[in-house]
Image (cartoon, rainbow, N blue to C red):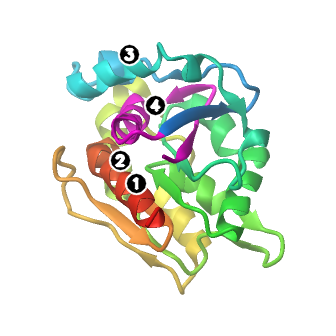
Amino acid sequence: MATVVIALATKDFDPTEVAAPWSALTEAGHDVVFATSDGAPGSCDPDMLSGVLLGQVKALPKHAEAYTELSATAAFASPIRFSDIDPTAHDLLVLPGGHAQGMRQYLEDETLQSAVVGFFKADAPVGAICHGTVVLARSVDSDTGKSVVHGRTLTGLPKRFEKGAWLATKATRGDYFRTYPEWVQDEVQDAMGEAGDWKPGPLLPVHGKGFVVEDGQLITARWPGDADRFGATLVELLARNSR
C-alpha cells in the first residue's frame, strides 16, 4: 500500500477537506501521515464544525465524525514537518484548503511550496482542493520561473462560490470567507497562464455531486462538497499507479 502525506495549516484548515480524503485513503488500506510547518499538530477551523449562517454552513455529520476520528490518531498527533515531505518517501501529497485567516501561514509557506515543486519534478501524484490550489499556484519551479500549474488543466474554488459566501456573511463575519483581496480563481488562473485550462464545474454548489479534474498525476477539486469524490479519485489514482 501507498504512504500518503496530507499537509495541514497550523490552524483553520477545513475539516471536511482533510477528513474525506483521509477516510477514503485509510479505508483503501493506505498509510496516511500528516505534515505541518513545525511538526506540531494542526487544528481545523472550529466554525466549520459548529457552523456559520445560523449553523447552515458546516461539515456534514459524517465528515465531522471522521475528523474526530482522525484527530485522535497517532499520525495526527505527531506530524512530520513540511521539510520532510519527499516524493521518494511519500506516494501522494494532498493539499487541503480552508478560508479563515489562519490559513495564510500554510498558503505562504515556502518550504511547502518547495516540496510541491519536488513532487511535480518527479511526476509524483498531487491532490489539491479549494484553497489548496493556491499552494500550487505559488509553487514556482526555479528552472522555469513559472508555477507548477502553468499550462495545466485544473479546477479550484470558483470565484462565484467564494464571492457568494463572502457577500452572504460580510455584515456579520467581515472577511471570514475572503482569505485575500484577490479571489482564489483569479490567482490560480494567472499562475496557469493562457495555456492553462480552468474547469469551473457545475454552476451551483451542491453536496453529493462532486466535481474533480484529472490532469496526469494532478487531481484537483473545488470545495468541501467535492471532497468525497476527491478522496475516491485519489484512491483510484494510486490504484492505477500500482499496476
Please name the residue that numbered disc 3 is placed on.
Answer: 68
Dot placed on the residue nearer the N-terminal end, 4 or 2: 4
Instruction: Identify the residue shown where x is 61% and y is 62%.
Output: 137
Query: Dot 1: within a 10 Å radius of its alpha carbon, few (fewer than 14), some, or many (20 or more) residues?
Result: many
| Secondary element at image label 2 | helix
Q: Position of residue 113 (x, y in %)?
A: 72, 53
**Mark nearer the N terminus (4 vs 1):** 4
Residue type of the residue flagged with mark 4: Tyr
Question: Hey, which quadrant is residue 192 in on the image?
Answer: bottom right
Q: Residue 223, percent across and down?
A: 35, 47
Against 107, residue 216 (above or below) is: below
Which amino acid type is shown beneath numbered disc 1? Leu
Where does the image place residue 181, in percent across and percent down from the top left? 56, 48
Of residues 38 and 55, the one drawn nearer to the viewer in this rendering: 38
Where residue 176 is drawn, which disc sits there?
Answer: 4
Task: Point out the frontmost of discs 1 and 3.
Answer: 1
Q: Which residue is mark 2?
A: 231
Q: Is residue 213 rendered to the left or right of residue 142? A: left
Question: CB of mark 4 within 8 Å of CB of mark 2?
Answer: no
Q: Is residue 202 visible?
A: yes
| Residue 70, picture quadrant | top left
**Can residue 59 be seen by looking at this rendering?**
no
Q: Residues in magenta?
A: 1-30
Q: Residue at x 60, y 63 (%)?
A: 124
Q: Are marks 1 and 2 in contact (CB under 8 Å)?
A: yes
Q: Nearer the viewer, mark 4 or mark 2?
A: 2
- Which circle's residue, 3 or 4, is located before the other in the chain? 3
Which is more N-terminal, label 2 or label 3?
Answer: 3
CA gap, disc 1 and disc 2: 5 Å
